[in-house]
Amino acid sequence: MQTQSQPDLQAVKTFLLKLQDDICQTLELADGKGSFQQDEWQREEGGGGRTRVLTKGNVIEQGGVNFSHVSGAQLPASATAARPELAGRSFEAMGVSLVIHPNNPYIPTSHANVRFFLATKPDAAPVWWFGGGFDLTPFYPFQEDVEHWHRVARDLCQPFGDDVYPRYKKWCDEYFYLKHRDETRGVGGLFFDDLNEWGFEKSFEFMRAVGNGYLDAYVPIIERRKGLSFGERERQFQLYRRGRYVEFNLVYDRGTLFGLQTGGRTESILMSMPPLARWEYDYQPAPNSPEANLYQHFLQPRDWLGVDG
């Protein structure tokens, strides 16, 4: 892992705080009723954050947009599993993480995260990196929505190189995969981590592009689908599929593990959970049904835009 150029932590923090503001304000406008309630918290070991949660809106059943900036004497196991050489270093970590669970089953659940890590120890050069991405989890997917989501992802990656979108799209497909179900959590998007080989300025520029790109990707889907009517069948399927979201977050999600392993604020860490979910033994969708369409066409990695060669 390279560590070119010195990081500007204040610039990153300033961007992240504004990003949280911008996302909350825009989603409130799209919802038309609900507002995010803020809860500021401090962490005994160092740092704190702003948790913002919207519940019982017109569009958003529950959604959270978190900012955190924490520090500690030793990186947790979740942060050093792939980088054992960093074990024992002190750290600072800051980021914005969000999950939106809509009321309407025709609007997908969405997740986004952008983050920055700095790991230090005496008599050694600091090591820093950016990570993040966004992904989409539909219940009754529309091809045009999925293509739009990936088109925004591709276009924001394009200035950084032709290989960036295919690489980070593939990483997203592989990361948000439920091995015990043999299916993707949704239709993917972007996922990147350990980014510092471009140097600080360019890496930070890419993180900003991903963070700002989330609204461009998600809000048009909300606007297209929020007026669609649905019934109990669609609602029950939505709740069943939300169970997959819970399974992934509690079994695989690095951010959840990092937060819990560093003694983070549990309410903020678990705000990603849906307000309601259900499980059903050996559920099988009816053949040729809208529910079967999700399984047959959307829950395995696909080249949505024809750009992966």
Image (cartoon, rainbow, N blue to C red):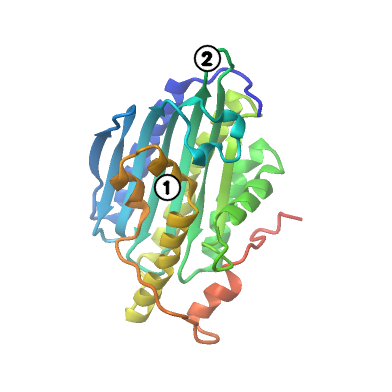
Residue 157 seen by the camera: yes
N-term mark: 1 or 2: 2
Give the residue at x 39% y 37%: 262
* Residue 76 higher or lower than 190, as above or below: above
Residue under label 1? 256
Which element is circle 2 on?
loop
Residue under label 2? 122
User: Which image quadrant: the N terminus?
Assistant: top right
Residue occupying the far bottom of the picture: 287
Name the side, left or right, on which 196 lies relative to 76: right
| Residue 274 screen position, x and y as percent | 34, 60
Q: Nearer the viewer, residue 304 or 8?
A: 8
Quadrant in the picture for residue 198: top right
Residue 195 seen by the camera: no
Q: CA distance from mark 1 to mark 2?
A: 29 Å
Say what amino acid the circle numbered 1 marks. Answer: Thr
| Residue 208 screen position, x and y as percent | 50, 35
Tell me whether the residue at label 1 lies in contact with that at label 2, contact meaning CB atoms closer than 8 angstroms: no
| Residue 148 screen position, x and y as percent | 55, 57
Q: Few, some or many C-alpha atoms within 10 Å of disc 2 (few <14, some 14-19, many ≥20)? A: few
Which element is circle 1 on?
helix
| Residue 8 screen position, x and y as percent | 49, 20
